[in-house]
Image (cartoon, rainbow, N blue to C red):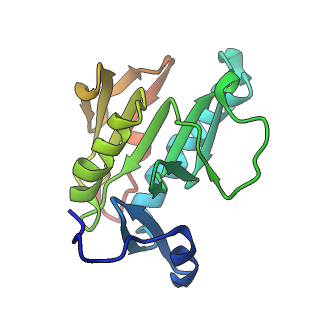
Amino acid sequence: MADPAKKKASYEDLFDIPENMIGEIINGELIATPRPSPKHVFSASVLGAKLVPPYQFGEGGGPGGWIILHEIELGLGENTIVPDLAGWRKERFPEKLETNWIEVVPDWVCEVLSPRTALRDRTDKMKIFADHKVGWVWLIDPLNRTLEVFGLKTDTLVPVAVFGGKAKARIEPFQEIEIDLSHLWLEEPGQE
C-alpha cells in the first residue's frame, strides 16, 4: 500500500524512468523494474507468436477477431500497468489511439512472472485487473514451467486451471487452438 503522506505518482513521472527499465504506476506508486530476463521474454514472445496468427489474422483456420499487443500501457483508473501481453476482442478495441496508453479494459491479460515481480503481479495487479473487470488473466512462471488461468466471476478473478511442464492444452479464452506448453520454456544448454 502506498504511503498516504507520499505524493501520488503521475504519468509524467514515467518519463524519468531510465530507458532500460519498465515504468508502471500501481496504486499511486511509481514502480520501475529492469527489462525482463531472456526466459521471461522467450515465454511471452512464443505465446504471442502462437496466438497472433490465428486470433488476430485468422490464419490456419483460426477464429480471428482479436487484437493482441505486447507490453502495451494500460490506463486503468489511476494505474498505468504494462502487462507482458494484452488482448481485446476487435469490436472492443479503440478506433482512435491518441495516447500512449489504452484505457479500454482488455478482455485478456498475460503476465510472465519473475522473482522480482511475482508478488506484485499476483496481488496488486490481480486486484486492479479484477476491479476493472478483465475477463481472463494468465500467469506464466517460466522458472517453474506453469501457466495459471484465472477467470472473472462477479468481481473476483478465480483460479480456473493450472497447466505445466510439457502439457498440451486448450485454454480459455483461446480454446480453439492447442498450446504446447513445452514451447514456452527456454531450454538452457544441457537441460532437457
Number of numbered tags placed on the structure image:
0
Depth check: give the residue in front, 126 or 60. Answer: 126
- Relative to residue 182, is residue 9 depicted above or below? below
For the point 66% across and 18% down, which residue is it?
62
For the point 69% across and 21% down, which residue is it?
64
- Relative to residue 8, is residue 122 depicted above or below? above
On-image quarter of the N terminus? bottom left
Q: Where in the figure is residue 179, as x and y percent of width and height?
A: 45, 28
Depth check: give the residue in front, 94 or 3. Answer: 3
Depth check: give the residue in front, 191 or 97. Answer: 97
Q: Where in the figure is residue 126, as x and y percent of width and height?
A: 30, 43
For the point 52% across and 80% down, which residue is it?
20
Quarter of the view holding residue 67: top right
Q: In this view, does 174 lie to the left or right of 169?
A: right
Q: Is residue 156 left or right of residue 112?
A: left
Q: Where in the figure is residue 152, as x and y percent of width and height?
A: 33, 24
For the point 51% across and 46% down, which residue is it?
85
Q: Where in the figure is residue 40, as x and y percent of width and height?
A: 40, 59
Q: In this view, does 71 lie to the left or right of 172?
A: right
Quarter of the view holding residue 78: bottom left
